[in-house]
Image (spheres, grey):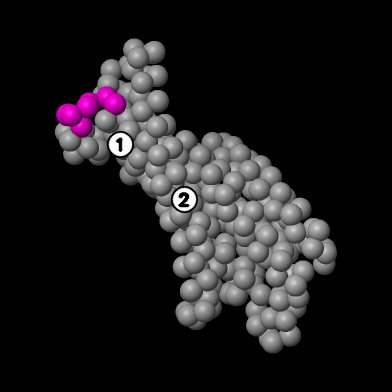
């Protein structure tokens, strides 16, 4: 995508405090404010998976926890956390940029000689990528905690100290890589939707719906690609 090429060429602007402030704000509003929701969802997900594996399919508690660790980190957490992020934040990014475009703020930045890519696109795309990693890690750890508590009860401390038996470094790295790719594409599509509106206020809500729908579609397509190439 052309937008990624422009962003890569402007990575050096992260040394400028105004750009970093926008990046920090994007990470805060995308990740921090949604972390509790993602954590609760992950905790419930882990408990449900372990209950199904142990109660319905007869897996031992230890095997159920191992399957949960692999399934949560490799498949469920990156996709579900990113889906929640897209549903919550992609529309906000698209509306913000579309409103700036309609109000003439983007054109004013260009007249002042400021790079739109550096000050508007880069911090939002990188911010959503960082937020996707944070939310994915939160959901993955919460799901493992939920599964351990359901499976072991008050003996959960033993299982927590033995997490290395449930997870492999390859699975953790794959989890982070998938989350990063999901966040980058979701951020790029949200920015593209915001900048592609016509100069009419009535098109601002359309940008929000396009950002969410295209973001959701991109996540499933990317997840399929990861499954094929892995």
User: Residue 185, image x and y in percent?
Assistant: 60, 53
User: Residue 66, image x and y in percent?
Assistant: 31, 29
Question: Does residue 187 appear left or right of residue 29 in this picture?
Answer: right
Question: Does residue 61 appear left or right of residue 191 in this picture?
Answer: left
User: Residue 204, image x and y in percent?
Assistant: 75, 59
Q: Residue furthest bottom?
A: 112
Q: CA distance from mark 1 to mark 2?
A: 18 Å
Question: Does residue 82 appear left or right of residue 57 in this picture?
Answer: right
Nearest the eye: 194 or 225: 194
Visible in this render: residue 21? yes
Q: Is residue 43 above or below residue 10?
A: above
Report the quarter where the N terminus lies: bottom right
Pointer 2 residue = 34
Q: Which residues are magenta?
A: 150-156
Nearest the eye: 72 or 222: 72
Q: What is the quadrant of residue 110 in the picture?
A: bottom right
Q: Is residue 226 above or below residue 103?
A: above
Pointer 1 residue = 145
Q: Residue furthest front?
A: 201
User: Residue 189, image x and y in percent?
Assistant: 66, 55
Q: How many marks?
A: 2
Callout in the foreground (1, 2): 2
Name the element at disc 1: helix
Report crowding for label 2: few under 14, some 14 to 19, many 20 or more residues within 10 A (C-alpha).
some
Report crowding for label 1: few under 14, some 14 to 19, many 20 or more residues within 10 A (C-alpha).
many
Asked if residue 152 is among those painted magenta in the image, a careful observer would answer: yes
Visible in this render: residue 5? no
Residue at 22 percent across and 27 percent down: it is: 153
Nearest the eye: 54 or 34: 34
């Amino acid at each position: 995508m052309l937008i990624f090429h422009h962003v890569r060429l402007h990575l050096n602007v992260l040394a400028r405090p105004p750009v970093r402030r926008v990046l920090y704000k994007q990470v805060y509003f995308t990740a921090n404010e949604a972390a509790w929701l993602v954590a609760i969802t992950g905790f419930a997900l882990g408990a449900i998976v372990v209950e199904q594996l142990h109660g319905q399919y007869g897996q031992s508690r230890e095997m159920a926890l191992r399957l949960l660790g692999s399934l949560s980190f490799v498949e469920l957490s990156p996709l579900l956390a990113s889906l929640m992020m897209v549903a919550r934040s992609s529309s906000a990014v698209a509306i913000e940029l579309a409103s700036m475009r309609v109000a003439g703020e983007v054109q004013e930045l260009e007249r002042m000689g400021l790079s739109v890519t550096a000050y508007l696109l880069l911090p939002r795309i990188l911010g959503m990528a960082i937020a996707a990693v944070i939310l994915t890690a939160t959901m993955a750890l919460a799901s493992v905690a939920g599964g351990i508590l359901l499976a072991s009860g008050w003996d959960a401390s033993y299982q927590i100290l033995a997490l290395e038996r449930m997870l492999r470094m390859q699975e953790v790295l794959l989890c982070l890589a998938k989350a990063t790719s999901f966040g980058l594409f979701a951020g790029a599509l949200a920015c593209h939707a915001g900048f592609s509106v016509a100069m009419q206020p009535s098109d601002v809500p359309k940008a929000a719906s396009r950002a969410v729908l295209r973001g959701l579609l991109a996540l499933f397509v990317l997840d399929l690609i990861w499954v094929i190439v892995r």
